[in-house]
Image: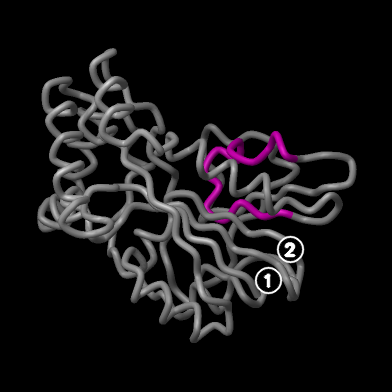
Amino acid sequence: MRYILSLRIPNEHGGNGLTEKLLKVLFPTDRHHMTGLHEIIGGLLPQTGRVLDLGCGANTTLSAYRTSGREVWGTDVAPKPQLRHAEWFRPLGPGGSIPFADASFDLIVAVMVMEHVAEPAPFFAEVARALRPGGHFVGHTISGSHYVTWIRRLLGILPHSLNQLLVRTLYGRPKEDTFPAFYRLNRRAQIVRACRQAGLGEPAIARYADPGYFRFLGPVQEAAIVADWALERIAQGWGRLYMTVTTRK
């Protein structure tokens, strides 16, 4: 089983007051995408049990959910320099296998991982193996229908080193935290097919508008909000960049 995992992208809009006002006017019901994600996670957390952050990066996104009765583990391809809570971290096994026994977790969460999955069927098969019966998977990623994804695909034609330099320049992300993207699990049909193949339930998808990819230039970010509003009226998902996928074993 071979798939690629990465750190999540920054979650702040980084814009001025006009950015927030435009979002409230044009997308009045949308929460910030990370707020929406954590609301979903909070509704699925077991009172006692085990949770896994799959592709955990620094291993901090879910650490606040750890209690005396709830274990919260993290796993990634390798420990990052900024790794926290090392006692709750295990590196992925050969081929990207989850380093835990069958039926180990009540909830598995993958934040900004699905766009980097090279082989969807093995990825979800491994998730299903590690979930307990009735357990949930929550994946937070970007929509394959949004134009930002197509921009990223075009940039992906460039050598990976140039992509790393561009991301570092625009977002300040270290090059070791920038990975190739495949977008093979970023459309509803792709997700439904992979879930069915793995024996997981019909996925639910929540979508969020967010112009954060353009936070390096305020006027572009504001124009992106208006463009997103117009595109969302043409087809669902065209104007909402982020989405949270939930499925159950």
Magenta range: 51-65
Residues at marks 2 and 1 touching, judged by CB atoms closer than 8 Å: yes
Relative image position of residue 135 (x, y in whole percent): 70, 67
Instruction: Find the residue positioned furthest to the right.
Output: 68
Q: Which labelled disc corresponds to residue 172?
A: none
Q: Residues within 10 Å of mark 1 (few under 14, many from 20)?
A: many
Which of the two labelled residues, at mark 2 and mark 1, occupies the earlier sequence position? 2
State the residue in front, 102 or 79.
102
Relative image position of residue 72 (x, y in whole percent): 73, 47
- Residue 63 among those drawn in magenta: yes
**Which residue occupies 69% across, 70% down?**
131
Q: Under tag 1, what secondary structure?
A: helix
Q: Amino acid at mark 2?
A: Phe
Q: Under tag 2, what secondary structure?
A: strand
Q: Is residue 221 left or right of residue 72?
A: left
Q: Amino acid at mark 1?
A: Ala
Relative image position of residue 205 (x, y in whole percent): 45, 60
Residue 210 falls in image quadrant: top left
| Residue bearing mark 2 | 105
| Residue bearing mark 1 | 130
**Which residue occupies 60% across, 54% down?**
75
